[in-house]
Image (cartoon, rainbow, N blue to C red):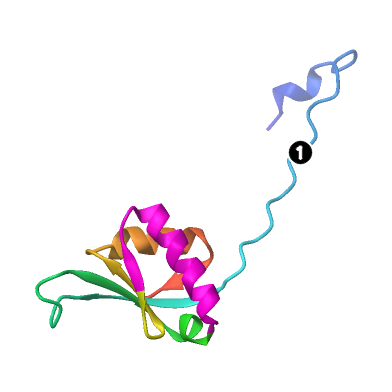
Amino acid sequence: MDNPFDRLDAGGLPPGKAPAPKPEPKRKLGKVNLRYERAGRGGKEVTLLEGQWIESQEARVRDLLLGDLKRALGTGGALEGRAIALQGDRRESAKAWLLRHGFTTNL
C-alpha cells in the first residue's frame, strides 16, 4: 500500500520536537500485605500493613512511610510493633498508593 505522506515535500519546515526521554522504570521496593482487622479493637476498623519488607526496615523508615500514608490517605495511624496500622478500612486506597510508589501488594 502506498503512504500518501511519502509524496509530500517537507522542505522549508522547521524540525519537529525532540522525542521525550523515556521515563525510568519504577523500582520494586517490596511486597506489602494488607489486612483488615476489627476483632479485639472495640469494634474499630484497622488496616494493617505487614510484610517482610516493612519488618526489615528501621523504625525511622517505617515512621516516614506511616507519615506519608497518613497524609496521602487523610487518616490516622500508628506503628504497632513491626507493622503499620491505619485507622479505618483503607485497603483499596492504601493499595493504590503503594502501587504508585513501587510496592507490590497481596490484594
The answer to which quarter of the image holds residue 43 is: bottom left
Determine the residue located farthest toward the left in the rendered image.
43
Query: Does residue 93 sit above or below 20 in this rendering?
Result: below
Query: Does residue 30 sit above or below 86 in this rendering?
Result: below
Closest to the observer: 50 or 92?
A: 50
Residue 101 horizontal side relative to residue 39, left or right? right
Q: Quadrant of the C terminus?
A: bottom left
Residue 47 horizontal side relative to residue 41, left or right? right
Determine the residue located farthest toward the right in the rendered image.
12
The answer to which quarter of the image holds residue 18 is: top right
Q: Secondary structure at mark 1?
A: loop
Q: Which residue is mark 1?
A: 19
Instruction: Give me the residue at 46% from left, 78% from top.
Output: 31
Total marks shown come to 1
Q: Position of residue 74 (x, y in %)?
A: 33, 52
Query: Residue 72 in magenta?
Result: yes
Query: Residue 77 in magenta?
Result: yes
Instruction: Give me the residue at 52% from left, 61% from top.
Output: 101
- Considering the whole magenta stretch, tell me its main secondary structure: helix
- The residue stretch that appears in magenta: 57-78
Instruction: Give me the residue at 85% from left, 15% from top.
Output: 13
Three-letter amino acid code at disc 1?
A: Pro
Q: Position of residue 85 (x, y in %)?
A: 32, 73
Instruction: Give me the residue at 13% from left, 81% from top.
Output: 39
Residue 79 horizontal side relative to residue 36, left or right? right
Q: Position of residue 35 (x, y in %)?
A: 28, 76
